Amino acid sequence: MTRKNKRSGRQPDRRPAKDTRQRPREIVTPDRYATAAFQLNNLIEKDEGASVIGITSAEHNEGKTESVVMLGFAFASIFEYRVLIIDGDFRFSGLHQHFQIGKAPGLTDLLSNRVSFENAISRTSIEKLYVIPSGTTVSNPLSILVSKRLKSLIRHLSSQFDVILFDTPPVLGYQDISLLSPLLDGVAVIAKAGQSTLPKLGSALSALNVASVNVLGIILTDVERKR
């Protein structure tokens, strides 16, 4: 993947976006995620368009949302990519809290034509890093993931960004990641040292394999804290 050539040939999106200018709560620094970001980037072979990567975990509370934020930091601040983070965890959305913005308007509002793209996307304090929160709660989240409008939106955004990161629900107990996978180039699974268990992680990987999801790798977090 030749990201330098891609960025030089892409026309920047000059449309205004909400400017939050709020720095997310940092628990670990972006440089600690730089290696993971570099490896994820190299695992996806694309000549044009953004790399669209899903971030998931086996179960809840394993640090996937914090990880997607810090990966976004790394891609934008270290590699200087134009990055968009999308909250696709409609049931337990938490991305907006890291950026101190509202949950809505967001993705669901954008796909239902309740708001414009400019009102759904927010700038962050990190140059080239943008975020779309989950949006207004919907009764049937799965319908969003299989909608033609979402497919069309990702195709459009792919021409505006270098990397798109999707914060998705955990694998176990939900079908979301399997339904979303056709729109993704791959998925990274977050595991938390001292909390994630091998049986649960194995079950999650098996489920992803059955659904033919392209698993890019496992990112183990909180390693130093458990020493």
Image (tube, rainbow, N blue to C red):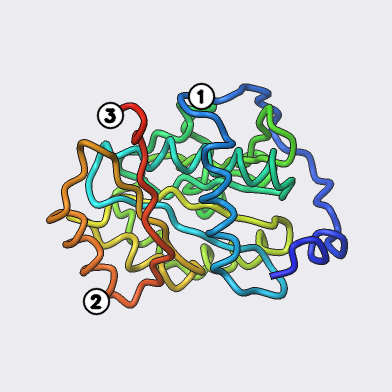
* Residue 101 visible at all: yes
Q: Which residue is mark 1?
A: 26
Nearest-to-viewer mark from 1 and 2: 1
Q: Secondary structure at mark 3?
A: helix
Instruction: Looking at the picture, tell me which residue is in the foreground, 188 or 175.
Output: 188
Q: Which residue is mark 3?
A: 226
Which of the image's four quarters has the N terminus? bottom right
Lower sequence index among marks 1 and 2: 1
Whole-percent x and y of residue 107? Answer: 51, 48
Whole-percent x and y of residue 146? Answer: 40, 68
Q: Secondary structure at mark 1?
A: loop
Whole-percent x and y of residue 75? Answer: 64, 46
Q: CA distance from mark 1 to mark 3?
A: 18 Å
Which amino acid lies under the numbered mark 2 shown in the image of this protein? Answer: Val
Residue shown at 54% from the left, 27% from the top: 99
Which amino acid lies under the numbered mark 1 shown in the image of this protein? Answer: Glu
Q: Considering only vertical position in the picture, is 130 above or below 186?
A: above
Which amino acid lies under the numbered mark 3 shown in the image of this protein? Answer: Lys
Q: Sort mark 3 into few (<14), some (14-19) or many (20+) by Cα contacts within 10 Å.
A: few
Q: Which residue is mark 2?
A: 210
Residue contact at pointers 2 and 3, CB within 8 angstroms: no
In the image, farthest residue toward the left: 199
